[in-house]
Image (cartoon, helix red, strand yellow):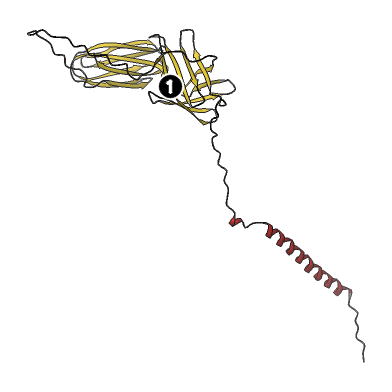
Amino acid sequence: MKKLDMHVPGTCLIVFLLIASAGCITIAENMAMGDNLAATPNVQDTATVTLVPTLAAVRPGIDPLIGVWRITNSQGYDDRFRYDADGTYQESFYDTDSTTTWIHTGTWTAQAANAYTVSDRVTGKTRTLNYFPDAQSIRFADMPHLVLKPYIGDVAAGVPYATAPPATPAVTTAIPAGATTTVLLPVLDNPQHLTGIGYGMVSFQARNAGTVTFHIYYNWSEGYDSKCSDEGARFVLAGPTIYDQSLYAGSAWKLHDADHTVKLPAPGRYSVTVHGCWGWWINIVNA
């Protein structure tokens, strides 16, 4: 009987060892991956978290706007603002023409970094205010040429601002019996309030001939046309039989706040043409 040769060639032994080793490595890797998968939650089961930046609430005594700010010049112009930590403000504005200090009040809110919205409580006008940390100053976005600086003090005492002057009590005059009277018909059905910034033309309707009073208010506080190049401010009236009658003429940089009484010669449509760089409004009433 022939004896079986149990000798295993070297090549076969090496192949066998490589296969065995590969199987061990695969098992070890699967075990390691199994550990990792067990420790890692399913991505589909995990809620997605999105970080949304929010504006922090103004902290009392911390916001840089809080305090008193002022702008003034050698001609007597004086405008002061006090912004309080509770989100309110008070302004004292000195009117050089009437020598009156008007008091405005309102609210302010932070909108973004160094940007604020302020709202006048009486007029309802809303404006944007910017704070410049490097210059320690604030400016209104619509009038960047005016710079307010920190002021050690408070707003000035004055008169609360109103959109219209207090009504004057009517005076009744007794007419003797038999006397002849002339009935003056009202020129305007209703008081007129016309507004604009810089150059503009506005109009109104007169029902009858007669006398009316134009109250003209022209000031940078009503706005500013940054492209304006006028050196003077002019308010010119035109209408039936009236051609360019001047109501007011002055410097484009001078505040004006006064009454101008004019007799309108006939009923019809009248216009007022305005030249100037600042904002303005005109109240027209029966005289």
Q: Which of the 4 image quadrants contains residue 179?
A: top left
At a point 57% along the width and 20% down the height, the residue shown is 136
Q: Which of the 4 image quadrants contains residue 21?
A: bottom right
Q: Position of residue 221 (x, y in %)?
A: 42, 18
Work out which quarter of the rendered image holds the N terminus and state it: bottom right
Front residue of this view, candidates 113 and 141: 113
Q: Is residue 184 left or right of residue 28?
A: left
Front residue of this view, candidates 274 and 287: 287
Residue tagged by mark 1? 105
Q: Is residue 269 left or right of residue 257?
A: left
Task: Please identify the residue farthest to the left as the structure is shown.
Answer: 178
The answer to whether 33 is drawn above or below residue 14 in the figure is: above
Q: Position of residue 152 (x, y in %)?
A: 55, 14
Instruction: Classify 10 Å Cα crowding around label 1: few (below 14), some (14-19), many (20 and above).
Output: many
Q: Give the residue type that dot 1 points to.
A: Thr
The answer to whether 113 is drawn above or below residue 213 in the figure is: below
Q: Quick one: SS at disc 1?
A: strand
At a point 25% along the width and 14% down the height, the residue shown is 169
Front residue of this view, candidates 121 and 142: 121
At a point 86% along the width and 71% down the height, the residue shown is 14
Front residue of this view, candidates 222 and 201: 222
Work out which quarter of the rendered image holds the C terminus and state it: top left
At a point 92% along the width and 87% down the height, the residue shown is 3
Q: Position of residue 199 (x, y in %)?
A: 36, 20
Task: Please identify the residue farthest to the bottom as the structure is shown.
Answer: 1
Q: Is residue 52 left or right of residue 5?
A: left
> How many marks on residues?
1
The answer to whether 30 is drawn above or below residue 74 in the figure is: below
Q: Position of residue 5 (x, y in %)?
A: 91, 83
